[in-house]
């Protein structure tokens, strides 16, 4: 039950970098159509990692964390915004050895390996969360009413084969499409949900009175403190995408499009279609209609539930949905090397959907300087739960470093999301 008692939640990957025309494999992750028609002969990813997340419960300020010299305590020092429907989210995306290459003038393939982890906790009462984290060592009474509490931790690996093809190649119009078929390797999941949880806490008597039901489950052998892939469960996933490019001046037909500067690019893709089913998942259904003492609570939610509430344990198949998302892109060339892009990343899984992961809805505007060996981007994002994030990143040959929120994390007292990414690859340009 450790997912409720997290201390920090750090979700989109590689913010700003994925739209770079030289991003290679990372552009394919965002839209599989990008595997073809790019100005790269081959792109070989050695390793890269992106971490993204946050909460509308905590306010993040990196300056305070850095100046604390390791003494910063999120529970004590971070600004908090407790509501009846707080949310936590976390995403880690590690891209392992991967490559893409051209087959013909009109088609390309790519092979992508990834390790991924997602955490979502939706609609949890902030005061209840804080009381649990503080072992109910609180001085004030509070009440709560969470109508759609649910949460999921899911870890999996994947190997994808991407194929892209140029569909239309006219002097002013260029259209390409792509698909990635993915073999999924599930490491396991932990999940909880409550169709309705309400109650009140009385500090003077250390009494918790609750009404409702809580469902809590884990896949067989899963330990969220020690995730491993020794006992994987297979599944199948799919990404689909299309990209259209418009050229304001007709060029010589014999000149390939990757050598011609487009004026406008529009892309649409749907990623992470699919699921992983875990047989023999253990699910406990707790009847929370009771009044209990919290005097002896000791940092273990699962033991507290077992000791104080009636429950029924069952074993059944749990099917975990991937964080399916719709991605929209408009990229406009201001001059030879300067671009400005507008993106939308939208979750296609419902927030109150059980047994599913999701991204947070985000709109991003990013100016970018782009050349063959160097790019710089400064994304400004409007993220779900009212957060505005401003960051920066660069690509210098084989090295990429960036964050979509570094400047707001440093300057704002209440930034609710943070992310960082780094990567090393071998790009072979045309």
Image (tube, helix red, strand yellow):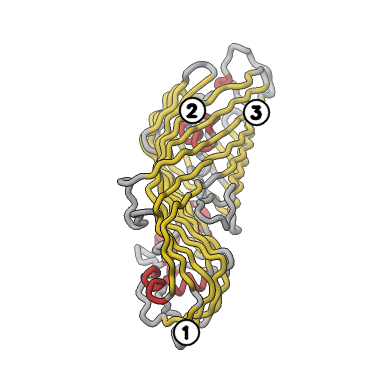
Question: Residue 408: x percent and y percent?
Answer: 53, 55
Question: Residue 35: x percent and y percent?
Answer: 50, 28
Specify the quadrant that holds the N terminus.
bottom left
Q: Is residue 367 above or below residue 11?
A: above
Density class for disc 3 (Cα within 10 Å; few <14, some 14-19, many ≥20) is some
**Who comes first in sequence, dot 3 or dot 1?**
1
Q: Nearer the viewer, mark 1 or mark 2?
A: 1
Q: Can residue 343 be seen from the camera position used here?
A: yes
Q: Is residue 260 left or right of residue 50?
A: right
Q: Nearer the viewer, residue 412 or 183?
A: 183
Question: Residue 141: x percent and y percent?
Answer: 52, 82
Density class for disc 1 (Cα within 10 Å; few <14, some 14-19, many ≥20) is some
Specify the label residue 374 is tagged with: none
Q: CA distance from mark 3 to mark 1?
A: 64 Å
Q: CA distance from mark 3 to mark 2?
A: 18 Å
Q: Can residue 56 be seen from the camera position used here?
A: no
What residue would you read off at disc 1?
203
**Who comes first in sequence, dot 3 or dot 2?**
3
Q: Is residue 218 above or below residue 333?
A: below
Determine the secondary structure under disc 3: loop
Question: Residue at (55%, 74%) from the top-left corner?
Answer: 198
Is the C-beta separation of discs 1 and 2 under 8 Å?
no
Q: CA distance from mark 1 to mark 2?
A: 63 Å
Q: Is residue 429 left or right of residue 254?
A: left
Question: Residue 428: x percent and y percent?
Answer: 42, 24
Question: Residue at (50%, 64%) from the top-left corner?
Answer: 58
What residue would you read off at disc 3?
263
Density class for disc 2 (Cα within 10 Å; few <14, some 14-19, many ≥20) is some
What residue would you read off at disc 2?
372
Q: Nearer the viewer, mark 3 or mark 1?
A: 1
Determine the secondary structure under disc 1: loop
């Amino acid at each position: 039950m450790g997912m409720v008692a997290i201390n920090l939640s750090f979700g989109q990957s590689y913010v700003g970098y994925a739209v770079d025309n030289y991003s290679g494999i990372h552009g394919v992750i965002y839209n599989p159509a990008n595997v073809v028609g790019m100005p790269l002969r081959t792109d070989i990813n050695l390793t890269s990692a992106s971490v993204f997340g946050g909460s509308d419960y905590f306010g993040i300020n990196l300056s305070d964390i850095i100046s604390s010299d390791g003494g910063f305590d999120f529970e004590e020092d971070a600004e908090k915004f407790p509501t009846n429907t707080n949310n936590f989210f976390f995403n880690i995306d590690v891209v392992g050895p991967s490559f893409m290459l051209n087959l013909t003038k009109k088609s390309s393939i790519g092979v992508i390996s990834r390790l991924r982890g997602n955490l979502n906790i939706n609609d949890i009462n902030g005061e209840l969360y804080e009381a649990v984290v503080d072992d109910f060592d609180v001085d004030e009474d509070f009440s709560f009413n969470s109508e759609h509490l649910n949460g999921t931790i899911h870890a999996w690996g994947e190997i994808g084969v991407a194929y892209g093809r140029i569909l239309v190649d006219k002097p002013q119009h260029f259209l390409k499409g792509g698909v990635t078929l993915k073999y999924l390797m599930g490491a396991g999941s932990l999940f909880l949900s409550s169709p309705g949880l309400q109650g009140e806490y009385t500090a003077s008597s250390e009494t918790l009175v609750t009404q409702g039901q809580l469902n809590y489950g884990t896949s067989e052998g899963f330990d969220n403190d020690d995730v491993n892939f020794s006992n994987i469960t297979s599944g199948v996933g799919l990404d689909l995408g299309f990209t259209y490019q418009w050229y304001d001046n007709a060029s010589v037909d014999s000149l390939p499009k990757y050598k011609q500067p487009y004026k406008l690019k529009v892309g649409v893709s749907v990623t992470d279609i699919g699921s992983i089913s875990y047989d023999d998942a253990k699910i406990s259904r707790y009847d929370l209609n009771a009044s209990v003492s919290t005097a002896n609570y000791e940092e273990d939610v699962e033991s507290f539930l077992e000791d104080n509430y009636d429950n029924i344990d069952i074993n059944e198949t749990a099917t975990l949905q991937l964080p399916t998302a719709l991605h929209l892109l408009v990229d406009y060339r201001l001059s030879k090397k300067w671009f400005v892009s507008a993106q939308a990343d939208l979750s296609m899984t419902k927030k109150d959907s059980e047994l599913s992961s999701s991204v947070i809805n985000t709109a991003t505007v990013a100016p970018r300087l782009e050349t063959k060996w160097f790019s710089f981007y400064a994304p400004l994002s409007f993220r779900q739960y009212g957060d505005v994030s401003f960051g920066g990143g660069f690509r210098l040959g084989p090295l990429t470093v960036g964050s979509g929120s570094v400047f707001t994390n440093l300057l704002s007292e209440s930034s609710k999301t943070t992310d960082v990414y780094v990567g090393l690859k071998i790009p072979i340009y045309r």
